Image: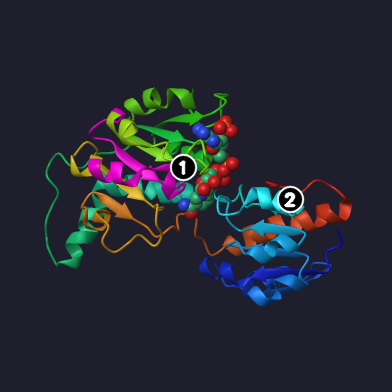
Amino acid sequence: FELERLGVHESVEAVFPPAELAASLSHLPAEVAVIGDDEIAGCDAVVTLEHREAFLEVEWVHSIQAGVDRFPFDEFEDHDVILTNSTGIHDRTVGETVAGYLLMFARRLHDHVANQQERRWDRPEWDAAFTLPGSTACVVGTGTLGKGVAETLGGLGVRVTGVRRSGDPVPGFDEIYTTDRLLEAIADAEFVIVTVPLTDETHHLFDAEAFDAMRDDAYFVNVARGSVVDEPALIDALEADALAGAALDVFEAEPLPEDSPLWGMDEVIISPHCAAYTRDYFRDTGDIVRENVDRLADGAEFHNRVV
Ligand code: NDP
């Protein structure tokens, strides 16, 4: 198809100002504009966060997220709409966020922040703080996020194991398990970190049985998607002290409802689905879009094509 008009859908506003991306793409050989729902029809391609029914009438949709579970693949296929995603850019951002969670738990920094809110001078128990070297983190999903987490934690002296479907080795991981050995893989880890896409296979991959398999002193981290976890089962495990704590960036319902018991737990760190945020996000996304506009001109296969 010929790219004449590319829309930057206003839903990207949740992550960066749409106008920043539009300006950075202004040198493309096509008209680039920030668009609302009523202007989708006039575009050949759209860069977006959310899905809209009207996208089925354009040629190409680019998701600014790596996770594309919100898009109806079958309908895209039926309407011959190309879908691309933004995998490949979240390695360092999410890796550093996860390292931050682990350091907060190990060095008790979350306690200090909580105490400061109350103007309370209160030191941790003598045996509460620890250091990371010598501990093991099991990272479930060894793609861009998993590799970024492994590289960042490796630099902090953590031994990192991974879980993926194929079981092939991945640089940065000391050991790789196949998904059918998940319970074995997570059994001895002090930290279990989830970085898989949400698919039919990974829906509720972490259920009561998985939390039961984990050590009682282990911390659970989810930076993937909320529905990879059976959230009530996680809450039960935390309430029963069957886990030491959790750091959660994603939830089954977002925003996390005000009445969720997770908000009130001392050993739970909550971030509002922003583990990958960076002021460079629009540039990183723009690079993928630009690459694909070049490929379109060359008649080459799109980078990061999902459908
Ligand atoms: P990638 O496609 O690069 O990696 C996905 C990895 O998951 C692959 O290593 C794949 O390995 C593995 N995988 C897929 N299915 C399974 C399974 N059933 N069991 C075990 N491993 C599996 O994706 P990204 O790393 O870029 O992103 C991963 C997900 O993280 C996204 O889909 C998104 O939902 C989420 N995300 C969250 C962000 C946030 O802000 N919190 C930011 C960015 C992404 P193999 O093929 O060998 O199974």
At label 2, the amino acid type is: Asp
- N-term-proximal mark, 2 vs 1: 2
Any atom of ligand 1 within 8 Å of the CB at mark 2? no
The residue to which callout 2 is attached is 78
Q: In front: 131, or 67? A: 67
Question: Magenta residues?
Answer: 213-236
Image spot of residue 156 (x, y percent): 40, 39
At x 83% / y 64%, what residue is drawn? Answer: 3
Is residue 35 within the magenta segment?
no
Secondary structure under tag 2 reads helix
- Residue 193 visible from this viewpoint: yes
What separation in Å lies between label 2 and label 1 (alpha carbons)?
A: 41 Å
Quadrant containing ligand 1 reads top right
**206 over 305 or under it: above or below:** above
At x 53% / y 41%, what residue is drawn? Answer: 199
**Dot 1, crowdedness within 10 Å: few (<14), some or many (≥20)?**
many
Any atom of ligand 1 within 8 Å of the CB at mark 1? no
Secondary structure under tag 1 reads helix
- Residue 174 visible from this viewpoint: no
Q: In front: 198, or 265? A: 198
**184 over 50 or under it: above or below:** above
The residue to which callout 1 is attached is 152
Q: Quadrant of the N terminus?
A: bottom right
Image spot of residue 271 (x, y percent): 37, 57
Image spot of residue 245 (x, y percent): 26, 44
- Foreground label between 2 and 1: 2
